[in-house]
Amino acid sequence: MKVELAIIRGGEKRLVPFEYAPREEGERPMALDVLLQAQATDIPDLSFRYGCRNRTCGLCTVDINGRPRVGCRARVREGDQLSAPSTLPVVRDMVSRRDGIARQLRGRVPSTLRGNDLDVEAPEDYHALTACIECYACLDNCPMHARNFDQGIERRDENKAYTSGNPFSLLKLQRIRLDPVATREDANKALNAAIELGIDACYDCPGCKCGVGIDLKRKVVKPLVDASKALLSED
Amino acid sequence: MDKETVVLSYDVIVVGSGGAGSAAAHAASRDGARVLVVTKDPIGCSDSKIAEGIVTVRGVAEESDSHEVLSDNLRLAGGDLPVPEITEAFAEDSEEAYDWLRRQGVRPRIDSKNGGPVVLPIALGGHSHRRSVSHDNGGLAVGHAAWNAVVQGDGVDYIEDSWFLDIVTEDGPEGPVVAGGLIYDAGEGCLIAVQAPAVVIAAGGLSTLYFPNTDTMRGNTGDSYAVAARAGAELVDMEQVQFLPFCLTSPPSYEGLLAGEPVTAGYLGVIRGADGKIILDSVMLRTRAECAAAMVRAVEAGNGTESGGCYLDLTANVKGERSAKYYVKFVHTAVSGVMVTVRQALGRAASEFKEIWEVRPGAHYCMGGVRVDAEGSAKALTNRHPVRGLFAAGQAMGGVFGGNRLGSTSLSEGPIFGARAGHKAAELRVKKMPEEKKSLSSEFEIALRSYLEVFGQEGDRSGSGMIRELQKAAWNGIGPSRSRVGLERFLRQVADFRKQASSIAVSKESIWNQAFIDYVEFLNMLDTAEAVAVSALNRPNSLGAHIRMDGGNTSVLFTKPYSVGVFHAKSGGLQTCKLNRPSTPWSTLLAHAYHGLKRRLELKILWVLPLALQDRIVEKKFRDVMGSLETEKPEAERKVSNGEELEAA
């Protein structure tokens, strides 16, 4: 099976053809299988991220034909092109720089929850949000995240954090709002953080897509949009 | 390397950001220390995150579950290799560690009857009491907690995409003293020298040595052990590598992934050899080590499948109409993530337990590790000096589990010993930081130079290729089946590999120099593999996870227990030592043996009963521990879509 790998080094991008040799008859390999075999044969110093091979660690996200997919569980077809997630600056080959995302929550989430009794049941939506594996597939087509690269300039603050948010960060904030152990103050702080990160970008957005199937629109974006509108109309 | 070395200073460096590293960083920062967390993968992306998410919490279900009982369970399962003060610490702190995880956002289901967390209905193999709490979304719940503890700020700085290369020590009057560490920041493309009086190693295990026969994170390249040993620390029990018995053999993309635990084999699960005959019954009551050992011996005796595995036969569990639904519910509660994997890999019929599964042991956890005390401080033989300021926690440390780790214990181990090490490390902080940074000592300069020289190294080998060769050799030499001949051959291969390391080509790229990363990880894997092999040679008989095909079994009753220690000798090369451990009293051993025999007998009797009666008895057993399924309200749909559905989308 022939595929193309986008090899990016020192700012130069090359499209390198690669012939995948199936390991058993009729094998439909995953994107990660292709990268591992390319490393074992043609490109020994190929750079790519991976961890658990079991769709849980969130590391192996790559773009297949320009769309982000969890590499260890995304099948590759003849002629597909594999490249680094395009929503973040590419460091080398399939590796994009991710650390500006998580950093934007520094100081915006409580360091230790101590509001209530720990033996309290969390709502179903809280558990639904815990399913997030942090694959960052949700950054794709996100108008809020796109603000970080407005006019081609990368916008990071002094802590190297992106100044505008994204569905992942909103999920983390909404999780705090749903957590029965968090205090009211924690929840309000989370809502304000969503506003600071630019929740208004979600007002007219048709919605985002999660890499592992969490209903982001209904369980993350809508509650935050509604609450932020209510809060802002109070002022 | 065209960028200048960055010089930083902190009170505590924590290497790793999983369950142990995050707890260490949090604890140290709470005590006022300025902490730097260094991780090569993004924050929280660790074995804790990808685990099944089951946590040991002493006393959560049964009052009789005392500290002594849990501590004894650990030592008994570990073949008396665990250190009593360490297992006692585990037993004392498990509830506090769980509460810490909950304060970071881990939310169990709450039992409406007793008002506490819902506990798995059946004790996991080797646990005398029910004390394992499972979580929706498995380890992801713990992953989020670790992430929170590091990212939130409050005195913790962190850098990801950064490889911790080595601890730098200086010679004091009482042996080596930690001066800091060296880091390769691949994202920025520079080396960082960090001056710090304390380093907590919490960088996980070594299972990537056995790739693809492993279900753990790629990053487990033995960094913890290699880095600590090079700094002068002693390692213990390194021959004790846990192989989970039930890992998949196919299809290729799923090779090595977990397909279940002994307890999820249910009351009627058995292991069969290639010839279809039962090689181990009462699987549910066995430890991971017992199951893996039975399989390895069957394969060695020629009764294995073509891909070197055996068959896990769970079909009897779903033959009885009444009991089947209890079994299915039990497995899906205990290991929901595993069942998604099995469904995708082996198909619907297998995932409904109607077909047998081909399985093979896979590397999961290293019980051995840095020799430390119960606070995580490095310990040393009386004629040597411990490295002052060196701490280890989580999978990096030894002495907790010895010959076998019981299910659900590692997610407690991380925060228990992470917090202990973090607090202790914070005590070494310098009260007032000097106004100006000290210039780097000669020890730093020497260490820096040794790494800077690697950039631009010429040669005809690749690091990734060498790693693959080492993985192949490791599976054969220090895998689940071992012998003197095999171990000695492996050590010769290690010596060869070491010679070839200087022929690995490394470019001069500063940013994300993949060849440099591969080179560094290859050497860590090599150092670790050698420590495993040397330790394995020094244990001629089988014990726990260590199976010597050319030796006998170690009787816990008649042998004085000892751990194998290993360290770099001043003269070069690895030196080993024996560390005596106290025996469990005869009375405890006999009581344990009697208890085990009784439970096994109960299961054996089930097999000879007619199906209808067997069905009723098993149903009753499940009902006694799970409650009736008849009265239960339909469960709200809370599972997110699985990978299969996504793929179709």
Image: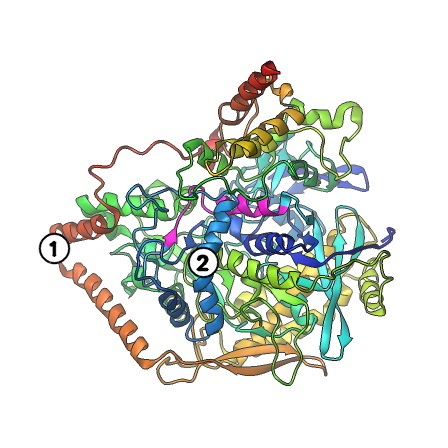
Q: Chain of mark 2?
A: B
The answer to whether residue A66 shows anywhere in this view is yes
The answer to whether B234 appears left or right of A25 in the picture is right
Task: Provide residue A220's location: percent of width, then percent of height.
Answer: 53, 27
Asked where in the image residue A196 lies, by quadrant, the reply is top right
Mark 2 residue crowding within 10 angstroms, few (<14) / some (14–19) / many (20+)? many
Pointer 1 and pointer 2: residues touching (CB < 8 Å)? Answer: no
Residue at left 42%, top 75%? B80
Residue at left 81%, top 42%? A10
Q: Amino acid at mark 2?
A: Ser
Q: Say which label, 1 or 2, has the lower sequence index.
A: 2
The residue wearing badge 1 is B610
The relative height of residue B48 versus residue B288 in the rendered view (above or below) is: above
The residue wearing badge 2 is B94
Helix, strand or loop at mark 2:
helix
Q: Nearer the viewer, residue B613 or B85?
A: B85
Task: Tell me the CA gap for discs 1 and 2.
Answer: 43 Å
Task: Provide residue B540's location: percent of width, then percent of height.
Answer: 48, 82
Task: Provide residue B531's location: percent of width, then percent of height.
Answer: 60, 73
On residue B627, the disc is none
Helix, strand or loop at mark 1:
loop
The relative height of residue B229 versus residue A233 in the rendered view (above or below) is: below
Q: Amino acid at mark 1?
A: Pro
Asked where in the image residue B267 lies, by quadrant, the reply is bottom left
Q: Chain of mark 1?
A: B
Q: Is residue B141 magenta?
A: yes
Q: Nearer the viewer, residue B59 or B32?
A: B32
In magenta, the rendered stretch is B132-150
Mark 1 residue crowding within 10 angstroms, few (<14) / some (14–19) / many (20+)? few
Task: Provide residue B388's location: percent of width, then percent of height.
Answer: 68, 71
